Image: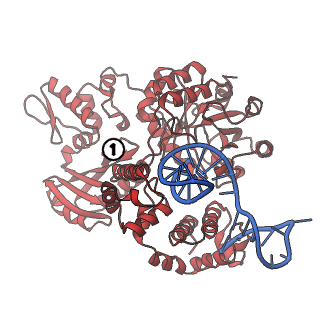
Amino acid sequence: MAMDRQKLAELLATMALLLELAGENTFKVRAYQGAARAIGKSTEDLDELYRSGKLETIKGIGRAIARHIAEYAETGTIEEYRQLKSTVAPSLLELVKIPGLGPKKAMAVHAALGVDSIGELEYACRENRLIALNGFGEKTQQAVLRGIEYMKKFQGSLLLAEAWPLAERIAAYLLEQDGLTAARVAGAVRRRCPTVREIVIVVQADAAGLATLEGILTAMPGVEQVTSPETSCFQAVLSVGISLLVRVAALEDFPAALCLFTGNDQHVAELRRLAGEQEWTLADGRLVNADGKAVPLAAEEDIYRKLGLSYPEPELREGQGEIALAAQQRLPVLVQPGDLRGAFHMHTTYSDGTASLAAMGEAAATRGWSYIGITDHSRTAVYAGGLSLEQIRAQRQEIERLNANRPDCLILAGIESDILPDGSLDYPDDILAQFDFVIASVHSAFRQSEAEKTKRLKKAMQNRYVTMLGHPTGRILLAREEYPLDMTEIIQTAADTGTIIEINASPYRLDLDWTWCRVAREKGVLLSVNPDAHGVAELDSVIYGVAVARKGGLTAANLLNTRERPDMLTLLRRKR
DNA sequence: GCCGTTTTCGGCCCGACTGTTTTCAGTCG
């Protein structure tokens, strides 16, 4: 069987962490980290290299690690990894996940205080025991507590990119069962919320099907603790840590049930209020008229039609004024993934990407895109292999060569330039002017006040060479809060300066948040769905960015990368 | 453990930030 590159890279990275937690020499640790990176980034056929005994031609792989990889190819595992795992306390691997607590401090609390879980660590903090340790103090203890609180807050949530395919798999699984005639994903996943605490599936079943459902769910892999709070409802905890809700509806009630369990509380409350105005009721999966008769509904659309509304796409059903728009038949025609003509913001092997420039161009062409904008990191981002002036020249030359050979997908030479703490960029204007476009992003000095940060971003947008503002709030979903920012002022500045705002489509970011998209649209700010890809597969992250745009009520016209090439090129140059 | 116009050991990626120190260690991006 072929080796799984990503799994092998993760295995080596975990070995590095285990070695560190076992107190090994830091250079050995670094060697394993380097090997993990090298494997993850390598585009060569690992199985072929193994068979021909050439694993050591990869920089960062020497004799010892090549032997580990050979073992992995043969057996699918690495014995030394197993051994390391048995010598290192499992709780240490948990403890280092706490932000602010690295390997050294995790080892210290484990060794000196006997802390063996996150719960114990929290207790030790509350008892003020951390400050007694060497190198620890009041502030470190506070930081650890904050880190734990932070982790707890995100427990029980999944990223949309994880919850969505999981929900679809569950629905498909249920549909295969006897007696269940339909199964549709509803809830937050159907509304494409950035993070999800509960997967909701609406199932169509007769009485016989309903009777078997508890057994089906109990037997389903990845499902724990099935309960049934009501007759037509089952709840379960999924092993991934979020909950599953299965609502059962009879054939004639299915459309209304799907509608009631898709919209958020506010959306559904507004629907009920509208029904009430006609002396109808909308409950228990039925729309009942004033005479107490169920109104026949063939599909979800019928409910909205009967209530005098045009059909709101599921993404919009957040109770943010969509009902009022639907009543006036003024809902926007939402952008779709197929509307995209290209994409900006992607990294290559010139900085921290895993795919070559040529491979990214090829991948974009196979997606039917007619342009892409390459943006490797700038020189301040040393940790990400930011480009020197010489590398910028070399990349530009390669892009020109590729464009000469492949006219169907135009490659634009851009850069993701760091916004320095004072709001200036990390290349002078004459260098920035050489790029086809510039994305300006914050990657350092996060801890500024709201006023400082707002001023910093505004200054960057006032630079005529800054085409787009990258991931405006800096948030990492379920991991790092957005930095404080006066977003209204940022959007206003974007409008005043003609700066495009990125909707970073990485499922870890989804930044700009959908709630701000409408404000941007109203101010006439152009947005761009940017994959922030570090490899070929991540180009497909645009579907999450399109989901954000749709939730924000954006049409194709509100986005840069739905434009045909000439239009797009004009917009890229409009500030210059 | 990896690498090498340094061939066989000695150096290994960087800078900011923070907190705990009183000159530096740990963490992070």
Q: Using the image, determine if residue A279 lies above or below residue A410.
A: above
* Quarter the N terminus of chain A occupies: bottom right
How many numbered circles are shown? 1
Q: Would residue A25 be found to the left or right of residue A275 on screen?
A: right
Q: Is residue A239 visible?
A: no
* Residue displayed at 71% across by 68% down: A58
Q: Using the image, determine if residue A15 lies above or below residue A486.
A: below
* Residue displayed at 33% across by 28% down: A320
| SS under mark 1 | helix
The subunit letter for the residue under badge 1 reads A
Q: In which quarter of the image is residue A296?
A: top left
- Nearest to the observer: residue A250 or residue A554: A554
Chain letter matching colour blue: B
Residue matched to label 1: A188
Question: According to the rendering, which colour does chain A have?
Answer: red
- Nearest to the observer: residue A151 or residue A167: A151
- Nearest to the observer: residue A86 or residue A212: A86
Q: Using the image, determine if residue A342 lies above or below residue A455.
A: below
Q: Would residue A530 be found to the left or right of residue A575 on screen?
A: left
- Nearest to the observer: residue A359 or residue A178: A359
What amino acid is at disc 1?
Answer: Ala
Give the x, y percent position of residue A11.
53, 69
